[in-house]
Image: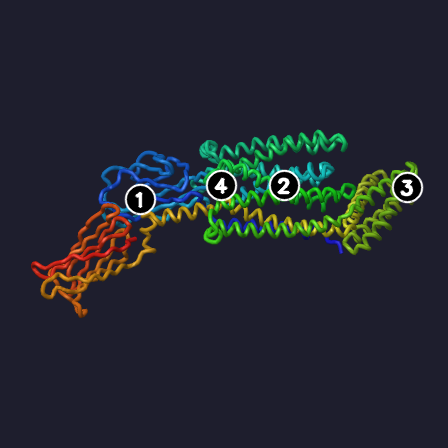
């Protein structure tokens, strides 16, 4: 039984909306593509003297505004001076007021990475000793909220518009030139242009708020827009708009002068349109490559052209697929998409998949860098999902190729024969039959054929036939009034149009192979919608190589090693022998939480038999030889027999510290024992 397109279209639209919502909710705030790999002072450290500036080091170059780096005292008052500046490579610094009092200071940063995504965060350090602070160390949130959602949706629409525009035009020129005169195809390609243009304008307006305050009210701030236009991303969006103006001219020629020419006259114009369209499409693809992942990191000179080829391959395949779907469902019966066009698209799609795989392998290596990144990073896991969807899409495409191989052009031949038969009829006979012939055709041929198909067309054709017969009966039985003639004529014209539409649909559905191809192409389009959503989220996710490099750099730096959640108490047992009478025992040092900053220290001295041992004096010293720090002396207080303690023991930096304990058992007998421990 032939199925109608409406339920399928509704299903596809619902799937589209569900995937959009799920992908944007799952994405949350856009992931940072530049990571903080070091800072001076480091996170959590306690310094004796207030620094004159703070500096931050990122995994790649970033763009800074005047307020990109801020330093706040314990009360939340800013203590930074001047504008932040790039001091060397990927290190940026801002000066501080002199004579800062002791306490805990908060450093916040909000920058834009080289691949156009906002990065924000915060950390603390202390001068003299830690203190309470009224400032939250969570840092600002960028890329989220309503503005972040709108920006993500705009990115999706821009990709979708580019794919439909480029792929639809390529399908017409390379596979089905007769499609230039099909209204449904024209509307599809034009809608791709409109979508891409509207999305680009929206992204341009949203950009300032997206990378800054995140407020909806700042979307139409002209000052922010002026700032955006001076950035790399702003230049890319403006370039895209200029290229879209050229694309509008291309579309006008493709669906205007090109469509009106005869087949043998289209050859030269086809070549010119192909060259011009390729240049415009490559320029549009470059507007993404020059401002996103491909423009930063390893081998940008190779990565950007590869990214352009990758985007063009995706557009040719998926955009052509969307156009084929529209042609199979909406092309008029006298202009059906023929088997030759489908076979040509099958070959073009195969070449696009090969280009997609080749460029995708290079991009994966560049963005991941190791096999472990596939499972250890968010980018790698998303990439695995994308690879699975591409594999599924290729599998469905293989089924479509099987339908293509069996596709016949019987419907087109039937239509052409019908047109030729009508052309042979004498003009007088056609005129004299008039509406009666149309009604007869409606009441018998189409109604009967529609009934044979068992679809809703039966009701449409039968109703139209009955109404038309009544109208004709009125015409034959009595002369219609002058007032009612135009109304009945319009009604008859609408009935004829409905019957003709039903007849054309019946003819389109008559070929079972064509029906099977429509179903498989519809399945491909559904998977493509999901694939595009995953790809959009992937472009907003920190590359696996960057994430792993940042983790490695942070893990070896003091900023990571000072994290208290990763720290634990340290217990050291050190036997001693002062050499005098009753001079042997064991000294135990407990340091909790063994981190940068304040610590609680307990010292226990025991005799060899395990009983507490009160000695005249116990002293402890901490030395970090790698940083030439120390020895830092600590004299614990005597608590009880064999137990000494000290609170607030300050260790300013993480590292392998030497902990030396001096035990004096008499006026002249003492010894110093030591062990190393990792602090932080």
330 sits to left or right of 608: right
Residue marked by disc 4: 293
Above or below for 120 versus 578: above
Image mark count = 4
Residue 76: give its label.
1
Residue 637: give its label.
none
Q: Of circles 2 and 3, which is in front?
A: 2
Real-space CA distance between mark 3 and mark 4, rounded to the nearest whole angstrom = 68 Å
Under circle 3, the secondary element is: helix
Dot 2, how many residues are within 10 Å of its Cα: few (below 14), some (14-19), or many (20+)?
Answer: many
Q: Are discs 2 and 4 less than 8 Å apart at CB?
A: no
Q: Of circles 3 and 4, which is in front?
A: 4
Residue marked by disc 3: 433
Dot 3, how many residues are within 10 Å of its Cα: few (below 14), some (14-19), or many (20+)?
Answer: few
Real-space CA distance between mark 2 and mark 3, rounded to the nearest whole angstrom = 49 Å
Looking at the rendered image, the quarter that the N terminus falls into is bottom right
Q: Position of residue 422 (x, y in %)?
A: 87, 40
70 sits to left or right of 162: left
Real-space CA distance between mark 2 and mark 4, rounded to the nearest whole angstrom = 22 Å
Q: Is residue 431 visible?
A: yes
Residue lying at the far left in this picture: please name it: 667
Real-space CA distance between mark 1 and mark 3, rounded to the nearest whole angstrom = 91 Å
Q: Position of residue 257 (x, y in %)?
A: 71, 30
Residue lying at the far front in this picture: please name it: 579
Q: Are discs 3 and 4 less than 8 Å apart at CB?
A: no
Real-space CA distance between mark 2 and mark 1, rounded to the nearest whole angstrom = 54 Å
Q: Are discs 1 and 4 less than 8 Å apart at CB?
A: no
Q: Are discs 1 and 3 less than 8 Å apart at CB?
A: no
User: Depth check: 175 or 451 in front?
Assistant: 175
Under circle 4, the secondary element is: helix
Task: Choose the circle earlier in sequence order: 2 or 4.
Answer: 4
Q: Of circles 2 and 1, which is in front?
A: 2
């Amino acid at each position: 039984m032939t199925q109608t397109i409406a339920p399928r279209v509704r299903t596809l639209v619902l799937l589209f909306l569900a995937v959009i919502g799920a992908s944007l909710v799952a994405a949350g705030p856009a992931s940072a593509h530049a990571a903080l790999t070091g800072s001076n002072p480091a996170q959590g450290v306690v310094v004796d003297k207030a620094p004159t500036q703070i500096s931050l080091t990122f995994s790649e170059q970033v763009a800074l505004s005047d307020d990109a780096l801020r330093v706040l005292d314990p009360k939340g008052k800013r203590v930074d001076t001047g504008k932040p500046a790039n001091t060397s490579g990927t290190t940026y610094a801002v000066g501080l007021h002199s004579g800062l009092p002791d306490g805990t200071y908060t450093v916040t940063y909000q920058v834009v990475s080289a691949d156009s995504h906002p990065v924000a965060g915060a950390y603390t350090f202390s001068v003299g000793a830690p203190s309470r602070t009224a400032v939250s160390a969570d840092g600002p949130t960028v890329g989220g909220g309503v503005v972040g959602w709108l920006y993500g949706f705009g990115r999706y629409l821009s990709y979708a518009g580019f794919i439909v525009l480029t792929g639809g035009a390529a399908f017409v020129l390379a596979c089905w030139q007769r499609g230039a005169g099909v209204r449904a195809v024209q509307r599809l390609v034009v809608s791709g242009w409109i979508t891409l243009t509207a999305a680009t304008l929206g992204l341009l307006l949203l950009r300032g708020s997206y990378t800054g305050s995140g407020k909806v009210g700042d979307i139409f701030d002209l000052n922010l827009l002026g700032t955006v236009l001076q950035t790399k991303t702003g230049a890319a969006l403006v370039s895209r708009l200029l290229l879209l103006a050229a694309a509008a001219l291309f579309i006008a020629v493709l669906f205007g002068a090109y469509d009106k020419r005869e087949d043998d006259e289209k050859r030269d114009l086809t070549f010119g349109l192909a060259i011009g369209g390729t240049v415009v499409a490559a320029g549009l693809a470059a507007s993404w490559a020059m401002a996103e992942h491909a423009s930063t990191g390893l081998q940008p000179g190779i990565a950007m052209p590869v990214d352009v080829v990758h985007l063009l391959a995706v557009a040719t395949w998926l955009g052509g697929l969307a156009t084929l779907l529209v042609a199979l469902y909406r092309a008029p019966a006298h202009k059906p998409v023929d088997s030759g066009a489908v076979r040509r698209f099958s070959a073009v799609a195969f070449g696009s998949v090969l280009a997609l795989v080749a460029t995708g392998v290079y991009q994966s290596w560049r963005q991941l860098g190791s096999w472990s990144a596939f499972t250890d990073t968010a980018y790698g896991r998303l990439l695995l999902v994308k690879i699975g969807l591409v594999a599924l899409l290729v599998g469905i495409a293989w089924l479509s190729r099987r339908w293509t191989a069996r596709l016949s052009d019987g419907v087109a031949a039937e239509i052409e024969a019908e047109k030729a038969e009508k052309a042979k009829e004498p003009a007088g006979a056609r005129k004299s039959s008039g509406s009666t012939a149309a009604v007869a055709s409606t009441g018998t041929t189409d109604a009967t054929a529609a009934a044979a198909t068992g679809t809703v067309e039966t009701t449409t054709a039968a109703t139209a036939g009955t109404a038309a017969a009544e109208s004709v009966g009125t015409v034959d039985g009595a002369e219609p009034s002058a007032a009612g003639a135009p109304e009945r004529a319009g009604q008859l014209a609408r009935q004829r149009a409905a019957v003709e539409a039903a007849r054309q649909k019946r003819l389109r559905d008559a070929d079972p192979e064509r029906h099977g191809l429509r179903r498989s192409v519809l399945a491909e389009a559904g998977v493509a919608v999901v694939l595009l959503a995953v790809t959009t989220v992937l472009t907003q996710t920190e590359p696996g190589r960057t994430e792993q490099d940042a983790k490695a750099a942070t893990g070896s730096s003091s900023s990571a090693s000072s994290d208290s959640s990763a720290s634990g108490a340290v217990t050291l047992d050190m036997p001693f022998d002062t050499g005098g009478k009753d001079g042997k025992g064991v000294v135990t040092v407990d340091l909790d939480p063994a981190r940068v900053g304040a610590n609680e220290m307990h010292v226990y001295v025991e005799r060899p038999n395990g009983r507490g041992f009160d000695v005249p004096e116990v002293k402890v010293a901490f030395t970090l030889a790698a940083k030439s720090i120390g020895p830092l002396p600590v004299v614990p207080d005597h608590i009880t027999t064999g137990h000494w303690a000290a609170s607030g023991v300050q260790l300013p930096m993480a590292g392998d510290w030497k902990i030396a304990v001096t035990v004096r058992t008499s006026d002249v007998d003492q010894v110093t024992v030591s062990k190393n421990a990792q602090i932080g």
